[in-house]
Image: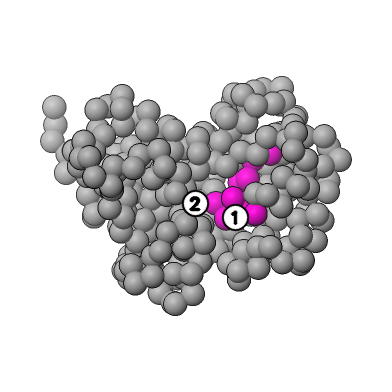
Amino acid sequence: MQFSPYTMKNNRPIGVFDSGLGGLTVVKQLTALLPHEDIIYLGDTARVPYGPRAEETIKRFSEENTRFLLSKKVKLIVIACNTASAMAGAYLKNKYKEIQIFEVISPASKEAAKSGKYIGVIGTRGTISNGAYEKSIRKYLPNAKIWTKACPLFVPIIEEGEAGSPAMKLIVKDYLGELKTSKIDTLIMGCTHYPIIKNLILKEVGKKVKIIDPGIPVAKEVSEYLIKNKMENDKKTKGNKEFYVTDITARFAEVGEMFLGENIKGKLKKASL
C-alpha cells in the first residue's frame, strides 16, 4: 500500500469548514454524536458570505479552506456550508482523493427522500440557483415534487442577533408563504444558519412538516464512516475543539456561541490561507 502524507490515524481531528460561523451548527451535531472526537473548525469570516459569489470564486475559496485543514493533518473533512457543498463539493472530492470529504447536501437529500414526496428547500441565492438539492433529491426519489425558495435576508438578520425579532417573523412569513400553500410534507433548511430559527420556520409551515437540519444526517454519515473504517478516536475523554477564522472581531465570538451553544470567547485563532 502506497504511503500517503494524509494516512488516517484514529487520533487525528475531524476538519470542518464554512464560509463563516454558521457551520458551528454542524459541529454541534458532530459533537453530540461523536463526543470523543477532536474537531478543527475553519470559518472564512473575512470573505463571508459565499452565497452571492461566482462558482469559480467559491471553488477557489473552498480549496484554500481544504488546504488549511489538510495542513492540520485532519483525518476527514466536512464542508459545513451549503453553498460550498453545491458549487465546490464534487470538485474537492475529485481533486483531494487522498482524504474523505463530506458535504451537507447529499445526506440531507437522502433524509428528505425518506420523509416525504413533497419537498421544500430554503437556502441562500447561491445554493438555490445552483439546483444542487433538486438534483440530489431526485437521485433518491425521482418522482419527488420539489419547491425551492431563496431566503437572502435570514443570514444577516440572524448574525445581527435579531433571530426572534418582529422583523424576522414577518420575513419568515413572507418567504415561506409560497411553500406553505404548496402543501409540502418535508422542508430542508439548506443553510447552516437556519437551525437558529427552526421554531419560527416550523410555526410558519406547520407542525406536520418534517424539518431537515443537514447537520444531523451528515453527522450520522461521518459516524458510520469512522466506525466502518475503524477510525474512531478511542480516547474516553471529551474531544478538543480548535476554532480558526480568517478575520477576528469581538462580535464573531458572540455569533459563534449562538450557533454552537458553547462559550468560545478567547478561543478564536487567526488563520492565514
Residue 226 x %, y %: 31, 31
Residue located at (42% from left, 32% from top) = 221
Q: On screen, 244 above or below 31?
A: below
Give, as a three-letter code, the residue at label 1: Ile
Q: Residues within 10 Å of mark 2 (few under 14, many from 20)?
A: many
The answer to the question of whether label 2 and label 1 lie on touching residues, with beta carbons closer than 8 A, is: yes
Residue under circle 2? 25
Give, as a three-letter code, the residue at label 2: Thr
Residue located at (67% from left, 60% from top) = 154
Mark sitting on residue 196 = 1
Q: Secondary structure at mark 1?
A: helix
Residue 79 drawn in magenta:
no
Q: How is the image coloured?
A: one colour
Write the start and end of the magenta stretch as one range.
187-197
Can residue 90 be seen here? The reply is: no
Foreground residue among 189 and 32? 32
Location of the N terminus (image quadrant):
top left
Foreground residue among 134 and 157? 157
Residue located at (46% from left, 63% from top) = 256
Residue that extends furthest to the front in the rendered view of this protein: 237
Residue 151 x %, y %: 70, 55
Q: Quadrant of residue 5?
A: top left
